[in-house]
Amino acid sequence: MDQSLVFDLDLINRYDKAGPRYTSYPTALELHDGFTEAHYRAEIVKSNALGGPLSLYFHIPFCDTVCFYCACNKIVTKNRQHAEPYLANLLKEIALQGSLFDSNRVVNQLHWGGGTPTFLNAQQMQQLMDATRQHFSLKEDDTGEYSIEIDPRETNSETIKHLRSLGFNRISLGVQDFDPAVQKAVNRLQTEAQTFGVLEQARAEGFRSTNIDLIYGLPLQTVESFSKTLDKVLQVSPDRFSIFNYAHMPSRFKTQRQINDADMPNAKVKLDILQMVGQKLLAAGYVYIGMDHFAKPDDELAIAQREGKLYRNFQGYSTHSDCDLIGFGITSIGRVGDVYSQNVKDLESYEQLLSQQKLPVFKGVALDDDDKCRAAVITQLICNFQLTFSQIERAYAIRFAEYFSLELEALKPMQADGLLNLTEEGIEVLSAGRFLIRNICMVFDKYLAQKHQQQFSKVI
């Protein structure tokens, strides 16, 4: 497939509006408190009847220091003892959830995110993985995709060695920017030696995939300064890049109020940085997966995209569309069968419910037939940049042109602008439309018109 990019500044300026990132459809905004633990348990019964592999996500919410740009669900504390009661409750949830899922369902994917997962010490990490192995069927042959998010400032060679022994084989390193002035402005001081030392150690220990996280649009960033950061990272040749657009929304996220608004790069600078990033990474041989992600051509994500098998869920792009996703810990979101569910967001409620042997689910949503059909359309577009109408028609017993007549009409201006090709057989996203894939997907989102768009970040 054609994986080239065209950076059309005029188009990007005209289409740069707020919209969802579509890690799910419906988005998390549609989760409601009318969804209960009973609904979730009932869906697990249906899911077990169908069988299939599992994906597990564990949220470790603690951070030693606060990064001012961060919009994640986190608890900032230097007191490491705060992890002990949380871990005890997490182990209870693992046992409770594990008792509900058939033991023969193999865990193909596992991910620890945060916060900072390495806030836990080695013994606590061992406890968590041991409990997971006790209650779920983890792969022991290293063929699973078992990944962890790493803050290099919280990691050393012994940590990496220990994580590998626990079964992790993929690692994602948070960097954001190496420029000292930018680091100071966002309160994340991190050296190149720290970062690349962890990366080298991970490779030496046999981690088979490495990802680097960067953010563009941070205070004091310029095209030149971010280019230097990117050049330094390219020298160590990670398998994947996640290069996120910083969404500055201090009215929603309190920590962002500590950033000086006067230091923020303007829209033109952000676009210039994005263009530079695309040019450098493509020249270095990476392919654009979509939604801020680049990968080497032989990476599993790139291969899956070329084969039309790429998937997207709450953890981002994935190669395992067949997995039910179970979320553990506060705020975690999962998808089991045809429901999304989210755990409670505070430590007190989490502990209270688990002490009563109750699942910590506090809201969710059950997908109806229309949701599932639209989710399939959006997933195909955002993952594979193309859609064949007949596949959707067979799967959902519809006539695409009739069911989505209004949406197809709404796509015609995008076709005129060169974002996509619209034929009787399907939709093909063109090179100029890849940076704007969220806009194309938004056409099929029936909930979007009912929402205030300021709840979402801008697409660029």
Image: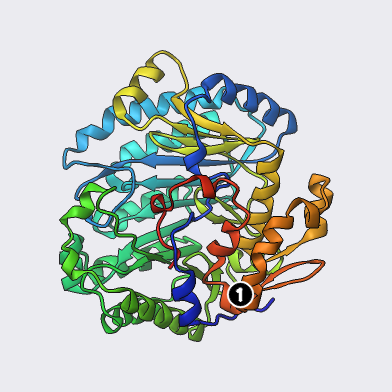
Front position in the image: 235 or 253: 253
Q: Quadrant of the rendered structure where residue 264 is?
A: bottom left
Front position in the image: 187 or 171: 187
Tally the numbered discs.
1
Which quadrant of the figure contains the C terminus? Answer: bottom left
Residue at 57 percent across and 26 percent down: it is: 40
Tell me, what colour scheme is on the image? rainbow
Front position in the image: 365 or 209: 365
Kindly tell me whether residue 309 is visible in this rendering: no
Q: Is residue 41 above or below residue 393?
A: above
Three-letter amino acid code at disc 1?
Answer: Leu
Front position in the image: 387 or 279: 387
Where does the image place residue 124, in percent across and percent down from the top left?
A: 33, 36
Q: Quadrant of the rendered structure where residue 41 is?
A: top right
Kindly tell me whether residue 25 is visible in this rendering: yes
Image side of residue 243 versus residue 76, left or right: right
Dot 1 lies on which element? loop
Where does the image place residue 285, in percent across and percent down from the top left?
A: 53, 82
Where does the image place residue 157, in percent across and percent down from the top left?
A: 30, 58
Residue at 64 percent across and 77 percent down: it is: 416
Image side of residue 214 versus residue 439, left or right: left
Which quadrant of the figure contains the N terminus? Answer: bottom right
Where does the image place residue 411, in percent across and percent down from the top left?
A: 65, 66
Label 1, residues with CA under 10 Å away: few <14, some 14-19, many ≥20: many
Q: Is residue 358 above or below residue 23?
A: above
Image side of residue 21 versus residue 159, left or right: right
Residue at 54 percent across and 73 percent down: it is: 288
Residue holding disc 1: 419
